[in-house]
Amino acid sequence: MAKDTVQQIKERLGIQDIIAPYVKLRRAGRSLVGLCPFHKEKTPSFHVSPERGSWHCFGCGLGGDGFSFIEKIEGVDFKGALKILAEKAGVTIEYSRGANKEEQSKKEKLRALMSRACEWYAGNLKGSPAEKYAKTRDLSDETIRNWRLGFAPDAWRALLEALTAEGFTVPEMLAAGLIKEADGKQGTYYDRFRNRLMFPIRDNAGRVVAFTGRALAANDVAKYLNSPETDLYHKSEILFGMDQARNAIRTRNFTMLVEGQIDAILAHQAGFENAVALSGTALSDKHLSFMRGFSDNLMLVLDLDSAGLKATARSMEPALAAGLTLKVARLPFGKDPADIISEDPKAFAEHIKNSKHIIDFFLVVLAEQEKDPLRLLRAMEQIILPMIAVVKSPMQQDHFIQATARSLGLSSEAVRESLGRVPKHSEAADGSTRERVSPPPSRSAVETRSQLLLAAIHAYRGTPLAKRVESEYSRITEVQQVSSEISSEPALFKAEQTFGEDPREDAADELLRAFEEAVIREAHQEGVNNLRRAETAGDAVAVVRAQEVCAKLSARLAALGA
């Protein structure tokens, strides 16, 4: 892809042209502001800079340029964002010669093939056994149309022959996972899906990349059959229904995770349009990363039998480690979401309303199921403690430690000591190993104010304000080495918020005074530390030197009135 394609788009589309269709913006000084589309808020914290072509939200911390905005809002990768913006700007995407162009052409052919296969299956549905089965599951005609459900006929080569007649090749259909080669019969091919209700699986941009087929014959060995992984379909990256659910996830501020396609579709039909489903795989890091782009809250609505409790808890540890707030809606034993929605949608809504944090959920369920105190203790150690161990918030950790102690009739200290013995590494949902992640260190007062002042110099270059700040900044930082890196976008937006469109020269006086005080206090604390080290070492010369430094810094603090 030629580099100037991106530049052409940026020249033709301003950042406000890209964002305005999704966010109502109003002018506020140098920036445009509006309600963030990525999290719920009542007071606008989403800022757009037409000058720099950037955006930043002070509420959720997200930010970037026009391409990153489209990636997040549309749930696509960079290439997907490029395609959307190129169409909007009227720019033709140019691809470089060679392997990349060939690879792109191959994927485009596969996408056309999968789209056609979806339409072919959907065209077979009317009056078929698959339609009859869908109706027994209470799927409405509108729902069936919206999700493009279809029917794979009970024939060996119906799809193969139909698509071959339309010009698609056997290698292409093999690459798409639509057909298979017969065992021991080289060169003989047949349809992968036969006599099944077909569910199209779409990527985050809404393009069909795979299928799940639900068997219609009672004696079929595989009740559900999924497409194999292909160049288009990577099951660890795609959640069924996410292309239709993402806007509702933003609005409701949580993702509802169910187990099967019918569960997800019926949830949407009942008004829970934030539901998505796994497609024959465990929850992966890529799933979690993508979900966090829409909400930090995840709710499990799964059919949890007693045998699967430990496995479920283990598979959810990565979600807790990623910082997601994870809840569980408890369903009646032996009932899945589709059953309850079909029987009584209001009852399903009540289960959602009464959901609990996953750790609180397991504390209750384990205590109900295990009456023997020692076996309960062992279950808590195996299921509860590993989940508490990956919770990022110290306050939340302490809450769950106390809750576990109360449930077991033990002291918090005993639970805390056992928690300290939980291995630091846990197996991820995708089978990999990860170490518990500590939250990044918070910025000191010096760093925070330094970034803001540097941003003011950059944002108001050449104005009296910038000259004054630059002069005072150099004088203050003689006391102590302070980072002078180029300011970040959040700092630039913050500076514009703080000083307005046409700031006075003295507008930064209070901030400069606070910055100087913070710098001197930090330097004074370091001087005190040096004094203690010198006294401990018995170094008289170092003691005198440290005392002099502390005295000078104390005098400067006094002069500031601090």
Image (spheres, rainbow, N blue to C red):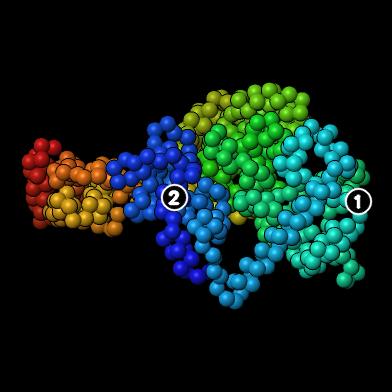
- Quadrant for the C terminus, please: top left
Q: Is residue 366 visible?
A: no
Q: 252 or 419, which is in the foreground? A: 252
x and y percentages locating residue 386 in the rendered image? 57, 41
The residue drawn where x is 54% and y is 57% is 87
Q: Taking 497 as reference, is 557 left or right?
A: left
The residue drawn where x is 64% and y is 50% is 206
Number of disc labels: 2
Decide: marks 1, 2 in contact (CB < 8 A)?
A: no
Specify the farthest residue to the bottom: 98
- Say which label, 1 or 2, has the lower sequence index: 2
The residue drawn where x is 38% and y is 47% is 48
Amino acid carrying mark 1 in the image: Asp
Residue 476 circle label? none
Dot 2, how many residues are within 10 Å of its Cα: few (below 14), some (14-19), or many (20+)? some
Where does label 1 land, which residue? 154
x and y percentages locating residue 180 in the rendered image? 83, 62
Q: Taking 257 as reference, is 37 left or right?
A: left
x and y percentages locating residue 422 in the rendered image? 55, 44
| Element on which disc 2 rests | helix
Q: 292 or 25, which is in the foreground? A: 25
Q: Taking 210 as reference, is 38 left or right?
A: left
Where does label 2 land, which residue? 17
Amino acid carrying mark 2 in the image: Asp
Dot 1, how many residues are within 10 Å of its Cα: few (below 14), some (14-19), or many (20+)? some
Placement of 209 over or under 344, stated as above or below: below
Q: Can you tell which of label 1 and label 2 is closer to the viewer?
A: 2
Distance between the alpha carbons at the discs numbered 1 and 2 = 51 Å
Q: Quadrant of residue 300?
A: top right
Placement of 426 over or under 342, stated as above or below: below
